[in-house]
Image: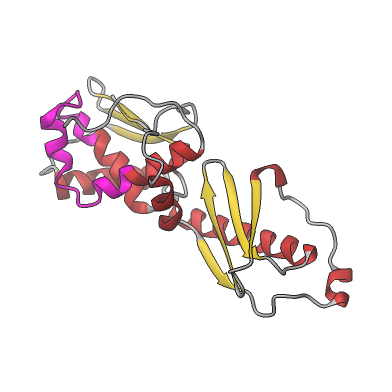
Amino acid sequence: MAAEPDSHRAASRRRARAASGSTVAAPGAHASTEAERARGPERGIDRSKVEVRRSARRSRTVSAYREGDRTIVLIPARMSHAEEQRWVAQMLAKLAAQEKRRVLGDEALQARAAELSRLYLGGRAEPEHVRWVTNQNSRWGSCTPSERTIRLSHRLQGMPEYVVDYVLLHELAHLLVPDHGPRFWELLDAYPRTERARGYLEGVASAARLPHIPGARNT
């Protein structure tokens, strides 16, 4: 059973962008000629996965966020190429640092599952094992009720905590109700950020053009 991405609501892309990212004020929107000459080639940046968007309306701030497997960097239109390179590197480093702080190890993930079960499911969902896996590219999480095991896709690492909590709680609920019927969604109604988390994941799935897989709320 799985918490799986939908891609039918384009508006949710905006919610995903707003929920995770970084914004920094850029003091002095033009670099000196000397600074630009001193600037060497950027290393370690896969520019095929970075999209820079310039805006004439943006004068002092630089923002960045993840969109699927790409990083979007928003900069003022008047920035020089050298400044662009510098800010892309800085924002990538900033996002990576934020994401590293949010990643739980398997033991911490197991402990978080126990806490979520206590808070929202009365402690009734008791998984034997909870771990990250790298072989789930079309679903966010999965569980095997007969073995009481839960697996979360590594693609969730770095996403907001409330999103990871939602997927983890989704899989915990499957230990109690194996299908996506009304009883299942009644369990998830106890989590106040269910709809927000689903909107975030839908935005990521849509941006990455992931296939639609059934599993949405029955209405």
Is residue 207 magenta-colored?
A: no
For the point 40% across and 34% down, the residue is 7
Name, please, the residue furthest toward the top.
Answer: 146
Q: Which residues are magenta?
A: 172-198
Q: Is residue 72 visible?
A: yes
Is residue 195 magenta-colored?
A: yes
For the point 72% across and 69% down, the residue is 78
| 6 sits to left or right of 190 | right
Pick the residue in front: 196 or 95: 196
For the N terminus, the image quarter is: top left
Pick the residue in front: 188 or 168: 188
**Quarter where residue 117 is shown:** top left
Residue 206 percent across, percent down from the top left = 45, 37
For the C terminus, the image quarter is: top left
Residue 116 percent across, percent down from the top left = 22, 47
Q: Is residue 74 above or below residue 217?
A: below
**Quarter where residue 133 is shown:** top left
Q: How many marks?
A: 0
For the point 27% across and 43% down, the residue is 113
Residue 33 percent across, percent down from the top left = 87, 75
For the point 89% across and 70% down, the residue is 37
